[in-house]
Image (cartoon, rainbow, N blue to C red):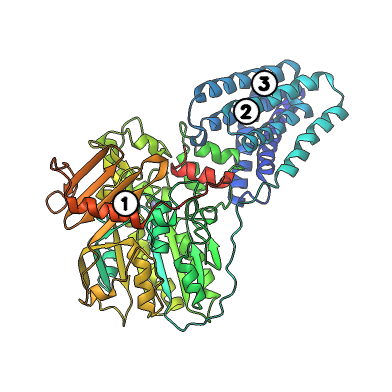
Amino acid sequence: MEKREHRWRALGCGAGAGLLLGFVDWFACGLAATPGSLALASLGLGLAGGCAAGALAAVLGRPALASGLVLAAGIALEGLSIASKELAGTGQLVAAAAVMLLAGLALLGLLRDDLGARWPGLAALATLPAAGWLAAFLTEAPLAGVAACAAPLAWIALARRARPAVLGAALLAPLAVLLVAQRAPASPAHRAPPPATATSAGPSVVLLVIDTLRADALDPAGALASFAREGVEFRQCVSAAPWTLPAVSSLLTGLWPSQHGAVTAATPLAEEITTLAELLHASGYATGAFTGGAFVGEAHRLDQGFEAFEAGCERRFANFPLRQPLVWRLAKNRHFPLRPLVRAVDESVGLAGVLSAARAWAEGETQRPKFLFLHTYQVHDYYLYDPDLDDAVLAAGPSASARFAGRLSVPPSELVTADQADLDHFRALYQGRVRAVEELFPSLVDALEPLVGADALWIVTADHGEGFDAASGRVHHGGRLHEDLLRVPLFLRMPGRLAPGQVVEPSVRSVDVLPTVLALLGLPVPSGLAGESLLPALSGERPYPATAFAEELAHGYGLFALRQAGWKWIRAPGHEELYRLDEDPAEKAPLSRPVPEELRAEARTFAERFPPRRTVEVELDDATLQQLHALGYVH
Ligand SMILES: [Zn+2]
């Protein structure tokens, strides 16, 4: 009889400890901030693990063993999450080994004194994720996480000597700290522009920027190519910069990077720069932006001129940078990926999330013409596992080497040193992402067209491309100015205003988009822009712009590129490359001949006309930094 009682007690201890672990984890992450699905996953994992531990202890007739096993597993899980991608770097293995050691000590401590069967053992469990979260909140150092995992050991030591009242107070103290700390600093607030006085009855505008979409990545028989045939397709559109912030800033301002100054992660778009959204808002447009965030967010002031600006459209868990439940950190772990769990509770909604946010806003805006800016990282993030988008590609191959196989997220800094076979694997994932965008695109047009009108101006483009060439080290984007990064798709569609089926072969620039949009809407084009309206060239009145420039001014690169009459010249401090794009479009072999004097003269004129703008560096908030880190930008 007594033995049977012990068995039930062991099972109860295990289940109770597991549930407590799950609940405290949920609490530590912020009850309101944790999505219901993840909270349930935390509770479910805790309960399942606790029942398993309890069942084992019941067989052995050892109630203390049940909560001891749950505690040890909890510490071990916390240790594994230390080795997650967010904390990748030195000290990982040492940290994980230290945590495993702590797990063993905790287990021994509980077994020795039979504390696990009593409430101090459960209290020890409760401190574990809470302390882990606190450590994550205060610092990203792995050792802090290890120290947090030691907290339950301190509990066990305390429980041997202290009175229950002291223990209770000690338990409440960290919970009180957690409640205060939950008021985390908010991300920079969006500043909506004052109401416009002008009114316009002009057509609506939809600008879709598919981040990191190479010009040659689209399927000629796909939905985007067929959309292009309904308007004007520019076959050679050159971006002004090779990464998101300066490139999107140039697109939204019609200025070269030198002019707008948003050229490093620490230099946002200056307040006095005028954006397309500000111009359209002043002309009576309702302006709404729905983006994947990071650089395309409030922190870098790309929200200027937008009445509505939602930067978290692609993530199911908004503003969830640090307080991620243990179960989620574990699932996304770099070394022990839990694909089934990620499949069950995935965080990415991609372009579909952008669409639903945009639709919800546009449905509420019935009076004024609309400017909708849509931006997606769905293609950009091909190295961050997304089950909906990647499972089919992963099943079909080409498979990755042991170095990358099974990884849920790969920092782009590792892609740079990958061999070509692995890059082919990532290229397949990338193309899978592009296909997913192409498949979603018709439903995006179907959903938005009734809200923006059949006469709306649609612009589909990208901010920059992506490299997959291991032999020449042209991998990922940023830090160089080759064609794989600068050539982007550009389609304009405006039924009744732009004849369908036009294909433009001469070069145009992303800085030409803003003046072309204004010209199409019949609005005045401000002076001092780098770009020019493409309408006179489209009607044959004027030639297309003769010269395209691009700049990369981050991290002291000091890169400048010039594209003119088939020439491409890339200039870096102490180094230059010259190509004939008509003979060598992939820039395989730089020419050994001297750079033509007319190109040098053009570069001198550029430097005189567009001297680098004085920029002010800002400190970014933690949430923005963490998102940039996850995208591979901030190291
Ligand atoms: Zn980008």
Mark 1, secondary structure of its residue: loop
Residue 58, visible in the rendered structure? no
Element assignment for label 2: helix
Tell me: residue 229, above or below residue 630: below
Nearer-the-camera pick, 391 or 364: 364
Q: Indicate which disc residue 587 carries.
A: none
Q: Quickly name the residue at label 1.
A: 465
Left or right side of 591 for 412 = right
Q: Residues within 10 Å of mark 1 (few under 14, many from 20)?
A: many
Name the residue carrying label 2. Answer: 144
Residue 558 at what x, y percent from top left? 35, 43
Where residue 249 sits: x, y (%)?
43, 58
**Residue lying at 22% horizontally and 48% vertically, measured from the top left:** 569
Residue located beneath label 3 in the image: 106
Mark 3 and mark 1: Cα distance apart in space: 51 Å
| Labelled pair 2, 3 in contact (Cβ < 8 Å) | no
Answer whether residue 139 is visible to the viewer in this image. yes
Residue 431 screen position, x and y as percent: 30, 51
Residue type at numbered disc 1: Gly
Identify which amino acid the numbered label 2 is placed on: Ala
Work out whether 595 lies above or below 536: above
